Amino acid sequence: MGSKYGDWLREQREAAGLTQQQLADMAVMTRSHIAHIEAGRRVPSKEDARRLDVALNTGNVLSSFLPREEESIADYFEAVRVLEQQAVLIKEFAVAYFPGILQTERYARAILGALSPPVGEEECDRRVVTRLERAKILEDPTTPVVWALLDELLLRRPVASGGVMAEQIMHVVHLAEAGRIRAHVMPFDAGQHPLMQGMLKLMWFEDQPPLAYGETHRMGKLHDSPSVVRELQHHYDLAMSDAMPLKESLAFLRASAEEYEHHG
């Protein structure tokens, strides 16, 4: 994800004799944000790139050669994985599959095993392990705070066997009942809502600007632009206002799990 861009930024900063903190002060950014850009984990917003150009006296090079915002999901996966580990608050919206950090091993294996083209058993095993590693952030009792807004569609479409679906749904129920996450269901009868087009992950951090990551069919986009992130946060809040309350959502999830268990 833009590592050549990050390498070039670091070379220009070092050539100017600046530390990351000094450049951050000049560009009105945080040091950690500079570090993430140099490491290729984040792409600066256009405004950030403009201020970096001014601070480094690089004309408009950093502004003109921003990495493409839209790449395949695989191109962004590593960056999102790293950022998840640093987030203090994560808000997820899921419409096709349960969010990665909430997936059980059997559910993850079922959906990864059905990919087209097939990834092979060894690669599937590797991805399952990676997904379970991501879920370890929930082992901390308080951080990050996690909200999950689940479209009813992902409960109604069986992407795995009935037993696996029931286990997955109850895993989310148990996390919510333990107070580790908040889980809300977006029911069909809510009609249209601002997040219908695909999954969305919002992340907040202690020492760097928030970001948003979205996926549609085979495409991922990581948003750093403050105005875009604010707009997506607003869309999430609007959608959440139409979701079922927590207690009602958990009852709905339990009923869905029982239905899958009943039908095998």
Image (tube, rainbow, N blue to C red):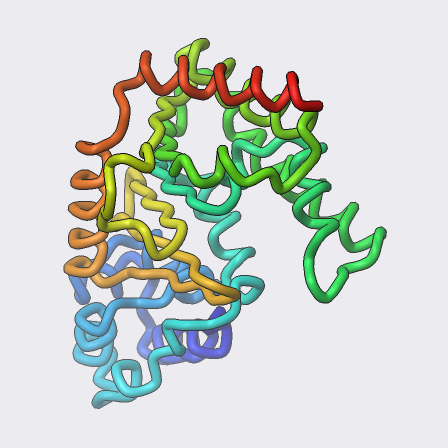
Q: Hey, which quadrant is residue 13 in on the image?
A: bottom left
Count of labels in the image = 0
Picture coordinates of residue 250 (x, y %)?
40, 16
Q: From the viewer's perspective, is residue 70 above or below residue 202?
A: below
Give the left or right position of residue 3, taking residue 63 as reference: right
Drawn side of residue 60 relative to residue 73, left or right: left
Q: Position of residue 234 (x, y in %)?
A: 16, 46
Which residue is most to the front?
263
- In the rendering, at what x and y percent does residue 182 appear? 36, 22
The quadrant of the picture occupied by the C terminus is top right
* Residue at left offset 39%, top offset 54%: 198
Give 144 or 105, whichever is nearer the viewer: 105
The quarter of the displayed image where residue 25 is located: bottom left
Vertical order, 142 against 220 (above or below): above
135 to 193, vertically: above or below: above
Q: Nearer the viewer, residue 252 or 120?
A: 252
Q: Which residue corresponds to the image point at 34% horizontal and 63% vertical from the top-left?
A: 19
Judged from this view, the residue extending furthest toward the right is 121
Q: Position of residue 21 (x, y in %)?
A: 29, 57
Q: Toward which corner of the image does residue 157 lie, by quadrant?
A: top right
